[in-house]
Image (cartoon, rainbow, N blue to C red):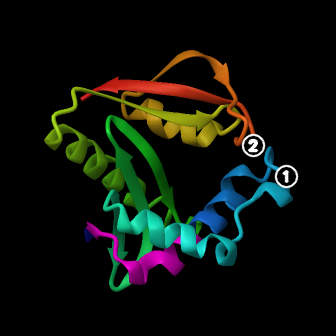
């Protein structure tokens, strides 16, 4: 079931982010640049309070989340143990539906250039890379901007 995130979900969200980063990015992100769940807990409480996060709740356990802001899909992560079961696809579709409901006609997101699995996930769902790789000062690697019509 997909539902709005609550403050009680913050520890699970921090853990999912940390595990997903280690699973997906360990080939190109230094270990010291990986999120540490305990250090991100307050940040996650703040993210939940903004009301843009929805979670995939599997029998009382949060196994993934997605967040939107304006016309951007800002994050979508699934616990590695729950990947391959359609959780990411359902969160993705839910996020796009939220953007449509807010009146958006196009959406965009960033994907690390080296994240081949993530790029394939989005490309399979109609996203297309736009422009050249880009790096913001706080990022740990180059990223590509992806866009799609809604």
Which element type, helix, strand or loop, lies under badge 2?
loop
Residue of label 1: 30
Residue at 28% across, 47% down = 93
Q: How many marks?
A: 2
Q: Position of residue 109 (x, y in %)?
A: 46, 35
Q: Main secondary structure of the magenta part?
A: helix
The answer to whether 150 is drawn above or below residue 12 in the figure is above
Q: Position of residue 118 (x, y in %)?
A: 56, 42
- In the image, 26: left or right of 18? right
Front-most of residues 125 and 5: 5
Query: Do the residues bearing badges 1 and 2 touch, measured as CB atoms within 8 Å?
Result: yes
The answer to whether 122 is drawn above or below residue 69 in the figure is above
Which element type, helix, strand or loop, lies under badge 1?
loop
Front-most of residues 103 and 81: 103
Q: CA distance from mark 1 to mark 2?
A: 8 Å
Q: Quadrant of the N terminus?
A: bottom left
Residue at 40% across, 84% down = 8
Quadrant in which residue 66 is drawn: bottom left
Q: Which residues are magenta?
A: 3-15
Q: Quadrant of the C terminus?
A: top left
- In the image, 25: left or right of 11? right
Residue at 70% across, 29% down = 135
Quadrant in which residue 143 is drawn: top right
The answer to whether 34 is drawn above or below residue 131 in the figure is below
The answer to whether 57 is drawn above or below residue 25 in the figure is below
Quadrant in which residue 142 is drawn: top right
| Residue 9 is one of the magenta-drawn residues | yes
Q: Position of residue 47 (x, y in %)?
A: 44, 63
Residue of label 2: 140
Q: Position of residue 130 (x, y in %)?
A: 51, 16
- In the image, 68: left or right of 36? left
């Amino acid at each position: 079931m997909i539902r709005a995130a609550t403050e009680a979900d913050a520890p699970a969200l921090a853990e999912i982010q940390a595990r997903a980063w280690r699973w997906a990015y360990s080939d190109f992100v230094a270990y010291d640049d990986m999120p540490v769940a305990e250090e991100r807990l307050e940040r996650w409480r703040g993210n939940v309070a903004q009301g843009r996060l929805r979670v995939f709740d599997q029998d009382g356990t949060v196994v993934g989340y997605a967040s939107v802001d304006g016309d951007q899909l800002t994050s979508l992560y699934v616990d590695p143990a729950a990947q391959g079961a359609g959780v990411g696809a359902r969160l993705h579709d839910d996020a796009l539906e939220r953007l449509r409901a807010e009146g958006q006609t196009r959406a965009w997101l960033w994907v690390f250039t080296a994240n081949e699995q993530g790029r394939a996930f989005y490309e399979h769902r109609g996203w297309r890379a736009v422009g050249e790789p880009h790096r913001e000062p706080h990022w740990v690697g180059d990223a590509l901007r992806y866009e799609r019509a809604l």
